[in-house]
Amino acid sequence: MKGMANFAQSGAYNQEVFRYLLEKETKRSERSGYFCRILLVHRTNAQGAIMQMDSHIAKTVMAVLSRSLRETDYIGWYCDGRIVGAVLTVLVQESMEQVAGHFQKRLVEILQAELGAEETSCLQIRVCQHHELEGIVSGEGTFAVN
């Protein structure tokens, strides 16, 4: 894809390239028998609506993800400026839920250490399957985060 040049200096793909890689990895995981999950990080207001992520928080989230994930995982904008995504690749089904829960908890701890409790209180983190993304199209509005 010629848009691969859109890999930002921050180490994250823009929305178009990230979604292309997400689709490609989803199809590959279906063929291979391995699984992938999508990690989403976004900021919400008091009503739970997804908000624009300020550049300091976005850079920190992406830096933490870059340090925490494997080279085979992709990081980018699921929704430009609003939702940071990571495609977690080559997971074994038996350990998926445990790994996802542990990683989610660890990510919260790291972000709180780097950004502080006040900045992270408005961040939502969710690990989901590809089919669960259908309701998250524009990045506006809300979705359930566990």
Image (cartoon, rainbow, N blue to C red):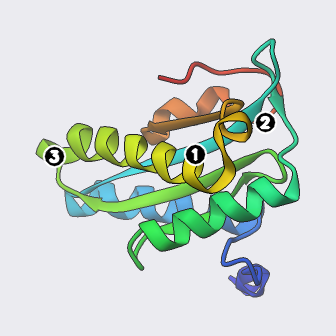
Determine whether, in the image, residue 23 is placed left or right of residue 27.
Answer: right
Residue at the image point whose x is 80% and y is 45% from the top: 82
Is residue 45 visible from the viewing direction of this image?
Answer: yes
Circle 3 sits in a helix, a strand or a loop, which is it?
helix
Closest to the observer, 109 or 22: 109
Residue at the image point whose x is 80% and y is 12% from the top: 47
Image depth: mark 1 or mark 2 in front: 1
Q: Are marks 3 and 1 in contact (CB under 8 Å)?
A: no
> Which sits earlier in the primary sequence, circle 3 or circle 1?
3
Give the amino acid at mark 1: Gln
Does residue 3 sit above or below 133 in this rendering? below
Distance between the alpha carbons at the discs numbered 3 and 1: 26 Å
Does residue 126 sit above or below 144 in this rendering? below
Closest to the observer, 104 or 111: 111
Residue linked to disc 2: 139
The picture places residue 22, in percent across and down from the top left corner, at: 54, 59
Q: Residues within 10 Å of mark 1 (few under 14, many from 20)?
A: some
Distance between the alpha carbons at the discs numbered 2 and 3: 29 Å
